[in-house]
Image: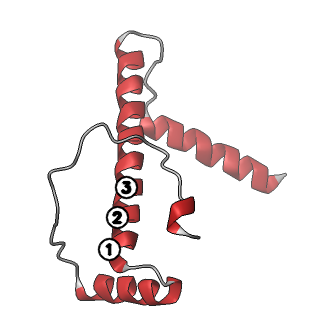
């Protein structure tokens, strides 16, 4: 895909002051990154940028969901469930499905 055809999905409201960063990777991770770069034809720094952007977006979504759940529990809209009891229920349902 030509670079000119790429479209921004988010709008940057400020310019990042971070111009360059050194990332230390384990040798096996660096090897896998180099292999992926060679396979896809994309520069390694671009692959790392995409991976970090996706990770940070997923982390923000998870944090938002957890904060919302905490507020729902705190104000009583949702009641917490005992983890062991929930696990037992799931095990029981699973065993019942296997028998039928």
Q: Residue 50, position in %: x, y? A: 40, 63
The residue that mark 3 highlights is: 53
Nearer to us: label 1 or label 3:
1
Which residue has dot 2 on it? 49
Alpha carbons under labels 3 and 2: distance apart: 6 Å
What is the secondary structure assignment of the residue under circle 1?
helix
Q: Kindly give the residue lying farthest to the front in the view shown.
A: 4
Instruction: Return the x and y of residue 76 as percentages of the image width and height.
Output: 42, 10
**Position of 14 relative to 26 (above/below):** above
**Spatial distance from mark 1 to mark 2, Cα to Cα?**
6 Å
In which quadrant of the rendered image does the N terminus lie? bottom right
| Observer-nearest of 5 and 34 | 5
- The residue indicated by pointer 1 is 45
CB within 8 Å, label 1 to label 2: yes
Instruction: Please say if 24 is above or below 73.
Output: below
Q: Residue at x 36, y 41 (%)?
A: 60
The residue that appears at 53% across and 52% down in the rendered structure is 7
Marks 3 and 2: CB-CB under 8 Å? yes
């Amino acid at each position: 895909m030509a670079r000119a055809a790429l479209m921004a999905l988010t709008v940057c409201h400020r310019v990042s002051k971070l111009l360059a960063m050194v990332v230390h990777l384990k040798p096996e991770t660096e090897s896998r990154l180099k292999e992926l770069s060679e396979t896809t034809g994309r520069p390694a720094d671009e692959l790392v940028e995409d991976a970090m952007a996706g990770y940070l977006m997923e982390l923000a979504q998870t944090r938002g969901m957890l904060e919302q759940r905490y507020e729902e529990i705190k104000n009583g809209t949702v009641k917490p469930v005992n983890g062991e009891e929930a696990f037992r229920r799931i095990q029981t349902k699973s065993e019942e499905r296997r028998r039928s």
